[in-house]
Structures are given as C-alpha cells and as structure tokens.
Image (cartoon, helix red, strand yellow):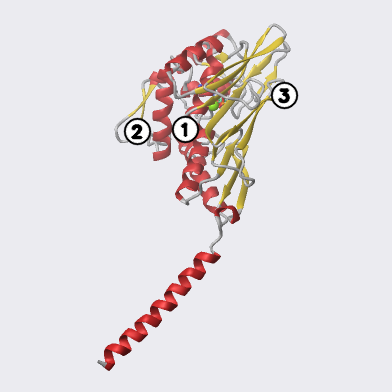
Amino acid sequence: MNAYKQIAKWGFLAFLIIATIYILRRHNAPTTSEVPYQECTGKIFGTTYKAIYQHPDDLSADIHSRLNEVDASLSMFNPISTLARINKHETDTMDAMMQEVFALAMRVSEATGGAFDCTVAPAVEAWGFGFKNREQITDEKIDSLKQLIGYRNVSMTADGLLKRQIEGVQMDFGAIAKGFGVDKVAELLSTKGVKNMLVEIGGEIIVHGTRADGKPWRIAVQSPTGEGFSAVLSRTETAMATSGNYLNYYVNEAGERVAHTISPFTARPVTHTLLSATVTAPTCAMADAFATAFMVMGVEQAKTVLEEHPALGAYLIYSEGDTLQTFAKNFSLDGK
Ligand code: AMP
Ligand code: MG
C-alpha cells in the first residue's frame, strides 16, 4: 500500500513539474506579431533578388542554396549549368527543374500560338542580348535564324531527355527562369512554415500574407517611360511578372529602340505599341512566360488569350499616339 502511495505521490509531482514547464513555455512563446521579419538579398541570372519573410530564424543559407540549384539548371550566365551544357551538346539530359520548366514552356507556347518560344536563343544571341556582340543582321541571317526557331523543334522524352528535330537548336529560359526561381524560394519558405513573405527576382514577384505592420504588401508597376510608377496594388496573395520593352534594350544606328523580346515568327525584336505587360497567374513562372508572350503578341492578341485563360490577370500599358493607355483584366489597382 505504501509503495502505491509513493508511486502516486511522485507521479503527481512529476505531472505538476511537466504541466508547469508546459504552461511557462506557452506563456513565453512569441506571438505571431513578435516573430521577426527577415530579409535576404543577392544576385542571380545577372539581376537581383530579395526575400522578406516572417520566421524566427535567418533562412538565407537555404534560400541561397535553392537559388543556386535553379541557377545550376537554367542559367544562361553559368557556363556549367544544365542549360549551357545542353546548348553545347555536352548532354541531352534535363534535370528535374529543367523538365518542369520545359513542360511549362511548351504549354505556354501552345497557349500563345507559339509567341512564347524557348528556341529563340540563336536570335537572342544574334541581336546582341546574349553573350556575344550583335551580329551583322542580313536577310540571309534572318532566314537561317528562322530555320532554327520553333518550339516544335524540341521535345522531351518520358525520361527527361531533350530531343531535337533539327541540328543547331538552342534553348533560352530567360523569359521564365526568374519567375520559376521565385516559385522555388516561395515553396521553400512555405515548407519552413512561413505564412508572410515577399519573394522577388528582377521584378517577378510572389507575396503571401502581410507585411511587418500587418498590412497587405504593396507592389508598384513601373511606368514604361522609366519615370515613377504606373500603378500600385495591395496584395495578400499574388504571383506576378512584368515584361517591358523599356527593361532591356539598346538604340541602334538608325536611332530605333531594339528590345530583348524576339518574335519567333520574324526572328526579329518585336516592335509594336504594347510597352509593358504585367501578368498574374497561379505560379510566378507561368506569369513570367505569359508576360513575355504578351509582349510578342501585342494588345489585341493578348486580350484573346486572357479571355481563354480566366486564371490569368493582366495590366497592359500601350501607346496610342502620344498618350499611354492601359488595359486591366482580373487586376485591381489601389485607388481605382
Ligand atoms: P522577360 O524579361 O521575362 O520578358 O524575358 C526576356 C528574355 O526572354 C529575353 O532576354 C530572351 O532571353 C528571352 N526571350 C525573348 N523573346 C522570347 C520569346 N518570344 N519567347 C521566349 N523567350 C524569349
Ligand atoms: Mg517573362
């Protein structure tokens, strides 16, 4: 009997100690608003990235390593990336990330009638937006570029091998990789339990939740004139990308602006009235790809694609005479 009493006494004591520790711990646990917002910045794909996220720990090492994985797969600027090695015919094996991006690229090519085309690489080079200086562009040169461009010239086997229909095809994921990188960092942060975050690479962006002051994130769409903002939006949930002919261009001998979006149909940089396309989509990679495609298609064709794809939103800025006009679909702006 005594032994039972002893066990009950010590058991009760142990229970009291554990319960007290538990209550004290709960009491001292930081509330959500006390968990700090961390910030991490750096460079990738020849541009900058930024992540702001609410988490007790600094996760920058994980973010850098995830971005290094993306860079090692898709970067044009990394001579040993899978993409660079594929373009040099050193391998035909696409890694897991490239397989994902390739499949999405093909879907967006289909959805945009070929305006998005990852095989524009030789034209990107020829027009001076790759590594080499601009080549002499002759009609013959354009004809030979046109032979090489066409998303149907490439396909992927079930085990992730690239198949080329013709020799000399090269790929460029510059129009999708930034958005894809944003998706991968946002995914990483979500798996770490982060609810409030902003992830941005070279203007392609994901936000979830709220800022440190509890308010929605505010995102500005740059004016295509290069001065100030064209629009500001508050968001608690969005994946968004912008393509603009003011973002990467040079002025040629004739004084014309040559921008980095290439029409796969003419193998020449596009020239039309659409100055900037901002797109929202279920993923940032998808937003990125459609934004580039819209720059190729122009306002009217972009509107048709938007009708066919209700999951997309867009804010298009185009010129009409001397004025700037805008078109918005599934896209609410602050103050409007
Ligand atoms: P973005 O800034 O996302 O519009 O991407 C522009 C980059 O995408 C260019 O610098 C090229 O590397 C590549 N690019 C250009 N034209 C196309 C196109 N029609 N389809 C896919 N990628 C393209
Ligand atoms: Mg893009």
Residue at 40%, 24% in the rendered image:
106
Q: Secondary structure at mark 1?
A: loop
The CA span between labels 1 and 2 is 25 Å
Q: Spot the residue most to the top.
A: 321
Local crowd size for mark 1, using a 10 Å CA cut-off: few (<14), some (14–19), many (≥20)? some
Question: Which amino acid, mark 3?
Answer: Gly
List the residue tagged with mark 3: 226
The residue tagged 1 is: 283
Which corner quadrant of the image does residue 77 belong to?
top right
Q: Is residue 39 left or right of residue 168?
A: right
How far is the residue under mark 1 from the one under mark 3? 27 Å
Vertical side of 292 occupied by 85: above or below: below
Q: Please tell me which residue is depicted at 54% across the width and 30% down the height of the picture.
A: 240
Farthest residue in the bottom direction?
Answer: 2
Q: Quadrant of ligand 2?
A: top right
Residue located 59% across and 10% down the image: 138
Is 195 placed above or below 241 here?
below
